[in-house]
Amino acid sequence: MKFTDTHAHIYSKKYDNDREEVVRRSIELGVEKIYMPNIDVESIDAMLEAELKYPGVCIPMMGLHPCDVKKDFEKSLYVMEEWISKREFAAIGETGLDLYWDKTFFEQQKEALKIQVQWAKQKKWPIVLHCRESMEETIAIIKEEAHEDLKGIFHCFSGTVEQAKEIVSLGFLLGIGGVSTYKNGGLDKVLPEIGIEHLVLETDGPYLAPVPHRGKRNSPEYIPLIAQRIGDVLETGLEEISSHTQANSHRIFHHF
């Protein structure tokens, strides 16, 4: 069985001591692709180095994470815009909104998101959205910007059934990760209402490790645990989870 981790920061310093082993173990467990969301200007080099070292496995996106949007965010976006003008990426991301950590630059976050949405439309690349404590606000912007060329993933989805249905109606997929294994994660109520045809697997490594690794460093090698949990909730075999999520991942990303 094959799997795709649609969202992992494998270039993070948290993997510096054993990145080689993590990638090898992930591949052995059937994880054939690891999509890497960019977060800021400083993360670009490390991300592209991982792409170079693991070609065809570690695949980069380009975007500015909402937690890295500050007063001078335009400078970061200029650098990123230059990158997307000179080479291809699998998606625009990780971008979006975050009201969990710091609300200081929320207006700038919205502006930065709208600019990156324009990039996604122009390039016809998908967009990968971070929406922590900001699901309604993120959905509202995507509804405003709705277009046949705008598609992507609401990463680390942890919203309601109603929000999930709205996201799906906009042509987006839900990224499901370690939260699905948490006792009070709430996804056991949402997933049966949505169905496997609208889901992709992700870890968000090194963050949000699934049970039984909760609280430790997350890793793409835990994707089969997440797939198994989704299978249990949907009362579906692992082969079917693999088949559908692989097809969804292949369909959503830009291939180059």
Image: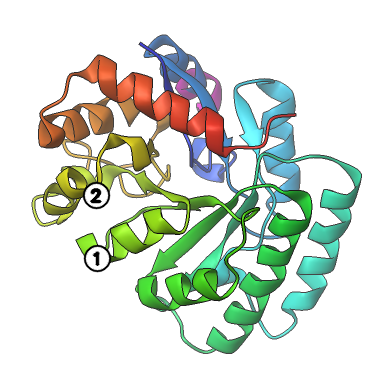
| Separation of residues labelled 1 and 2 (CA atoms) | 18 Å
| The magenta segment | 18-22
Label 1: few (<14), some or many (≥20) within 10 Å?
A: few
Measuring from the top left, give residue 147's x and y in whole percent.
Answer: 62, 61
Q: Secondary structure at mark 1?
A: helix
Residue 215 showing in the rendered view: no
Residue position marked by numbered label 2 in the rendering: 179
Dot placed on the residue nearer the N-terminal end, 1 or 2: 1
Q: Secondary structure at mark 2?
A: helix
For the N terminus, give its image quadrant.
Answer: top left
Residue ID at (82%, 73%): 75
Relative to 91, 136 lies left or right? left
How is this picture coloured? rainbow
* Residue denoted by label 1: 162
Q: At which x and y percent is residue 132? A: 38, 68
User: What is the quadrant of residue 225 in the picture?
Assistant: top left
Please determine whether, in this image, residue 84 is positioned above or below residue 251. Answer: below
Above or below: residue 237 compared with residue 208: above
| Camera-nearest residue between 93 and 165 | 165
Q: Could one spot residue 2 in this view of the protein?
A: yes
Q: Amino acid at mark 2?
A: Val
Q: Which of the 4 quarters of the picture holds residue 122? A: bottom right
Q: Eyeballing the image, is 158 above or below 18?
A: below
Q: Is residue 113 magenta?
A: no
Number of numbered discs visible in the structure rendering: 2
